[in-house]
Image (cartoon, rainbow, N blue to C red):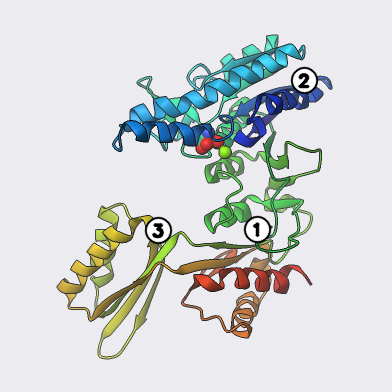
């Protein structure tokens, strides 16, 4: 039976003509073994950033439609060059833009969601070619406008293609050789995970370890696709992201992360009665503000204090809303801090192991780090601390859970 695989090469992997030729060689090593390859590529190197910068030199207020039109050109360069490199190497290949592959998305410019792909057309093209090259990150809406999927969206293009073509394995080639237990820039010798579950990967991404575009992992989970993260520079085995039922070994903790893209707000002494939280959070909702953690504590005399975190980029809008809510509800004060970090431990093994939170808090206390907020999910525990202690906390937690 004919074997197929989907491979995605990120911007750094196709950053120069030399690297593109190298990628062509890698792909050829598969077709030489009789495997047909559907390849998805990102734009070369920092192209997308450069295109954004070009637009800024024209206006600060470019329309979303024209931004997507502009950004989609980056991938059109890399698909054609890769096709040429494959042809030069004697491999049959044909390239497709998102619109040619009929990657149909909704009309949300700059953050579009894929709705369908013309798999019939692509499978037909596979009859005459060993390699199909599809531009990542882009599609068209039902009115024919070019759309893009959000930064890093080529991962999602690759997994969506695998799902639609019925291909089980999707390799994501990047500049790291897999998913690690912590950021190697912080922890001196983190371990590379040979496998990790979809849910852990999503949780790691949400909590700051951004190896893959999150939606690609959601897609892979939904369609049961084996996602493999590996390096385009060597043949080292990467990390496979798969259903947790298929995992050989379930670690209590598989990763420690930290992120500092959020700010914390506290509104003190608001009336402790029904409807108060709604006043505040519906107003944030109206402005499309993403609220991450929320903690409410009851004080004395029927008054409560609410703390919550939002993205730093929304700081000013949120501050204005808090000040107006403070006046209306006669709260005593609004305080805020942008110097916070959220440090988290993630692992499916947590589901069946008691005492993980206790061990985590002990590590903080031993290092005299004050925990300002705590939140938990099924497979993760996060603590908000002062950002100056973030590295120390990650190192100490890694030592506690992953170096013993
Ligand atoms: N070229 C796009 C970006 O830089 C898409 C991608 O790389 O996945 O965000
Ligand atoms: Mg990328």
Q: CA distance from mark 2 to mark 3?
A: 48 Å
User: Residue drawn 66% across and 14% down?
Assistant: 84
Residue 183 numbered mark, or none? 1
* Residue 265 image offset from top left, x and y in percent: 34, 70
The residue that disc 3 covers is: 311
The answer to whether the residues at label 3 and label 1 have Cβ atoms under 8 Å apart is: no
Front residue (pair 16, 315)? 16
Q: Is residue 89 above or below residue 75?
A: above
In which quadrant is the C terminus drawn?
bottom right
Q: Is residue 238 above or below residue 269?
A: above
* Location of residue 390 (image quadrant): bottom right
Q: Residues within 10 Å of mark 2 (few under 14, many from 20)?
A: few
Looking at the rendered structure, the secondary structure element under dot 1 is: loop
* Residue 163 image offset from top left, x and y in percent: 60, 32
| Figure quadrant, ligand 2 | top right
Front residue (pair 378, 356)? 356
Most extreme residue toward the bottom is 301
Q: Residues within 10 Å of mark 3 (few under 14, many from 20)?
A: some
């Amino acid at each position: 039976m004919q074997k197929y695989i989907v491979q995605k090469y990120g911007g750094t992997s196709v950053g120069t003509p030399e690297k593109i030729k190298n990628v062509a060689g890698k792909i050829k090593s598969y077709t030489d073994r009789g495997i047909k390859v559907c390849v998805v590529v990102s734009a070369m190197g920092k192209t997308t950033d450069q295109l954004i910068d070009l637009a800024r030199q024209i206006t600060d207020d470019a329309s979303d439609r024209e931004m997507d039109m502009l950004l989609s050109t980056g991938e059109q360069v890399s698909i054609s060059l890769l096709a040429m490199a494959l042809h030069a190497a004697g491999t049959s290949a044909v390239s497709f833009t998102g619109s040619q592959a009929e990657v149909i998305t909704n009309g949300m410019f700059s953050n579009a969601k894929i709705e369908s792909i013309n798999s019939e057309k692509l499978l037909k093209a596979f009859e005459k070619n060993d390699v199909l090259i599809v531009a990542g990150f882009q599609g068209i809406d039902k009115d024919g406008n070019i759309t893009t999927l959000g930064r890093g969206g080529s991962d999602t293009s690759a997994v969506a293609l695998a799902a639609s073509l019925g291909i089980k394995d999707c390799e994501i080639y990047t500049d790291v050789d897999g998913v690690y237990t912590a950021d190697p820039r912080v922890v001196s010798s983190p371990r590379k995970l040979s496998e990790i579950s979809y849910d852990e990967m999503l949780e790691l991404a949400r909590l700051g370890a951004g190896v893959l575009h999150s939606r690609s992992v959601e897609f892979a989970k939904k369609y049961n696709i084996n996602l493999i993260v590996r390096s385009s520079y060597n043949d080292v085995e990467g990390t496979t992201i798969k259903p947790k039922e298929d995992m050989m070994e379930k670690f209590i903790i598989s990763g420690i992360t930290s992120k500092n893209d959020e700010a914390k707000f506290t509104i003190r002494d608001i009336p402790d009665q029904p409807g108060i939280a709604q006043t505040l959070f519906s107003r944030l909702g109206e402005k499309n503000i993403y609220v991450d953690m929320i903690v409410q504590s009851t004080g004395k005399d029927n008054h409560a204090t609410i703390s919550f975190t939002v993205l730093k980029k929304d700081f000013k809008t949120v501050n204005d809303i808090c000040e107006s809510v403070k006046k209306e509800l006669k709260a005593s004060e609004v305080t805020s801090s942008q110097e916070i970090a959220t440090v988290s431990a993630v692992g499916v093994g947590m589901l069946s192991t008691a005492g993980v939170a206790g061990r985590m808090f002990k590590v903080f206390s031993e290092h005299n780090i004050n925990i300002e907020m705590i939140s938990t999910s099924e497979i993760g525990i996060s603590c908000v601390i002062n950002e100056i202690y973030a590295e120390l906390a990650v190192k100490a937690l890694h030592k506690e859970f992953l170096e013993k």
